Image (cartoon, helix red, strand yellow):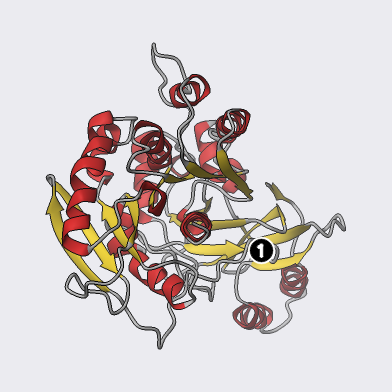
Amino acid sequence: MHTTGAHSPLLTTLRTGVRADVPGAEEEFWLHVAARGTPLIDPDPHGDPDHRLVTLLWRDDPERPATDVLALVHTVVDRDRHAGDLAPHLMRRVPGTSVWALGYRLRADHRASYQFRPFRGTRQEALRTDRASWLSVLDTALPDPLNPAPVLPARDGRHPASVLSLPAAPPQPHTGRRPSGRRGTTSVHQVGGRRVTVHLPPGRTPETGQAPLAAAVLLDGEMWGPVLDAGALFDQLHAEGALPPTAALLVDTMDHRMDDLSCNGEFVDLLADTLLPWAEREYGVASAPERTVIAGQSAGGLTAAYAAFRRPDRFGLALSQSGSFWWPDDERGTEWLTRQYATGARRPVRLRLEVGLQEWMLLAENRRLRNVLRARGYDVSYTEFNGGHDYACWRGGIADGLVHLLGEG
């Protein structure tokens, strides 16, 4: 993925019209954009059917015109920010108009969330890459008002993001709620000093006395619960018959990620010895490890794989999305968990790993763990998606992973 000097034909028409003083050229441009939606997606300028020219557009506020506009394409801009160079992601104004534009040449299966950050100041300010400046950018970045797709919600008071999904991106059929679908029940509890959100299938209550439920423990419950509404996802999967009746146990971890989600045996034991027995007593959750999945992203993905290694008696299924398998970066050496899987006795567990092709900091490590698991005879499913460290990708992958692990059990 890289920025390109190529222009969408619609932009070329605009430039030509403005230069020729054609009346209403810009208004006509925005009418076409509103009809098509953004980003503009055109054939690859090099004629490659596996790529597209993608043009991001921002419309200036005439009352408060920007001096620069930064395009924030998830993970890709982060890579350049780490390299200290945000210049490739500064949008360019079409002279004499309110149109800011930036083109990317992308593979046709790319998916990413994105935002814009208009600046009204110096270019030096717009290009700052120190942590404080970058957090300020993330806190104030805005979604694309012309993108017709549903936004990706955010937490901590940040604005939502827009989502770019190119034609060959993996489908995400389970992420939308059926308008007429039945909703399960959701409740919030304190278990072992942790906030846990429980979502039960439609029609299921603790008093029904039905067959035991499968269990899906989702780490970072603060995100999957009130922000992304994982309950709706589970309801959709249940309505489609894609999952057996499953209780979702969403565990809050974001406020203490560095402690909980760094191969912390005490935390995993808390889940295994306190949370799961509680869910069994209160909600009729099955105690069988082959019906219990733990799922997480980033450090949570690392922890999901670690939980299956440490406590296979409780977690027989693990779903790791963009797992931080580089951990730790200290005197113990990197990729500690991969070494444990390579040298330890083989556990009776099934794993599913997925990682994004844009995740330069994780891709090689995930591939190495996959290779170790296969060499040791583990039942492991492995997927690479063309995207980044991004809930826009993970929300589809978590549905696919749950169906793969629980639906085939």
- Going by the picture, which residue comes out furthest to the bottom? 180
Quadrant assignment, res 95: bottom right
Residue 81 in view of the camera? yes
Residue 94 in view of the camera? no
Relative placement, left or right, of 191 versus 130 is: left
For disc 1, the marked residue is: 166
Badge 1, how many Cα within 10 Å: few under 14, some, many 20+? Answer: some
Relative placement, left or right, of 373 versus 402 is: right
Measuring from the top left, give residue 342's x and y in whole percent: 52, 22
Residue ID at (62%, 28%): 375
Q: Nearer the viewer, residue 119 or 311?
A: 311
- Number of on-image labels: 1
Q: Nearer the viewer, residue 370 or 290?
A: 290
Quadrant assignment, res 152: bottom left
Label 1: element kind: loop
The amino acid type found where label 1 is placed reads Leu
Q: Is residue 295 above or below residue 228?
A: above
Q: Nearer the viewer, residue 177 or 113?
A: 177
Q: Is residue 258 above or below residue 234?
A: above
Residue ID at (18%, 69%): 206
Residue ID at (44%, 82%): 178
Quadrant assignment, res 21: bottom right
- Going by the picture, which residue comes out furthest to the right? 47
Measuring from the top left, give residue 341's x and y in whole percent: 49, 26
Q: Is residue 227 above or below residue 190?
A: below
Measuring from the top left, give residue 58's x and y in whole percent: 54, 65
Measuring from the top left, give residue 88's x and y in whole percent: 62, 44
